[in-house]
Amino acid sequence: MIYFDNGATTFPKPKSVVNAVNYAITKIGANPGRGGHNMAIKASDVLFECRNNAAKLFDIENPENVIITNNCTTALNTVIKGILKPGDHAVISSYEHNAVVRPFEYLKSNGVEYSVADVDYNDTEKTIGNFRKAFKENTKLVVCTHASNVFGIRLPIQRIAALCKLNGILFCTDAAQTAGIIPISLKNSDIDYLCTAGHKGLYGPMGTGLLVINSDTIPESLIQGGTGSLSAQVNQPEILPDKFESGTHNLLGIAGLNEGIKYVMNKSPQ
């Protein structure tokens, strides 16, 4: 079989990813952060290692700013719905996935307005100009795909991010199609939020994703619940990553994602 559907999910997965998932389900029968016995500690170690390796891959100083999600859609919804309030305006590109468009359509009924900046794949300057013209006084966020899942066209996200920074606007990129394939460094970058799938270019299992926060502006969390930390406190913890990781983690997926990230780093040119 020759597989051509990597834009949806990569296949086959590296053997190390398969082995890690198998080891987690057969040898680590514990919930990270919910116990002090050996297996629970081992589960927490897997979680920490995955977060730490993702921070290395995307060149961000604090691993705590790497939020593990169920998928890229969850990461994007966290940023969009966690940042925007009634009366705010946002801008998206004309190449956005429904993981971006549908949350914005939903927010329209809550008083959030958005504009679409047309992408001219033959003229980067025109694309940048279209984003600039779409800005308003109340523009708070720009969400822009790094590469189209339909056309494969890469957008000039670093330049769009710099334009946003100049105008005091937060910038989020959907890197579902590029993370692990195109190097992305958040060090000295104007990208505030990077959202990606774990099961595409990072070679992890499906049901994994990442939100990397590179800003002092922290979104509100979509859900609240048990985090395995500050359990005597009735309010959701504000510390990262706990604020966004309520409920039992997908340890099997995270174990596989960790190995997928290591696979990418080992294959990437140094």
Image (spheres, rainbow, N blue to C red):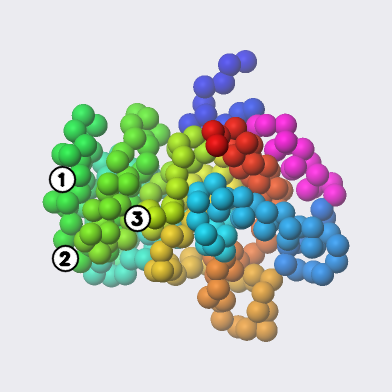
Q: Is residue 194 magenta?
A: no
Are discs 3 and 1 less than 8 Å apart at CB? no
Residue 229, numbered label: none
Identify the residue position indicated by label 1 in the image: 129
Q: Secondary structure at mark 1?
A: helix
Looking at the image, residue 202 lies above or below residue 74: above
Image point (45%, 44%), residue name: 184
The magenta span reads 13-27
Q: Please tell me whether mark 3 or mark 1 is closer to you in this view.
A: 3
Left/right placement of residue 114 relative to residue 250 reads left
Q: Position of residue 249 (x, y in %)?
A: 66, 58
Specify the quadrant that holds the N terminus: top right
Q: Position of residue 34 (x, y in %)?
A: 75, 68
Identify the residue position indicated by label 3 in the image: 190
> Please, what is the three-letter code of the amino acid marked with disc 1?
Gly
Looking at the image, residue 121 lies above or below residue 55: above
Identify the residue position indicated by label 2 in the image: 137
Q: Secondary structure at mark 2?
A: loop
Left/right placement of residue 151 relative to residue 199 reads left
Q: Tag 1: Cα neighbours inside 10 Å, few (<14), some, or many (≥20)?
A: some
Q: Position of residue 144 (x, y in %)?
A: 33, 47
* Structural distance between the alpha carbons of marks 2 and 3: 20 Å
Residue 248 picture quarter: bottom right
Looking at the image, residue 59 lies above or below residue 111: above
The foreground one among 228 and 124 is: 124
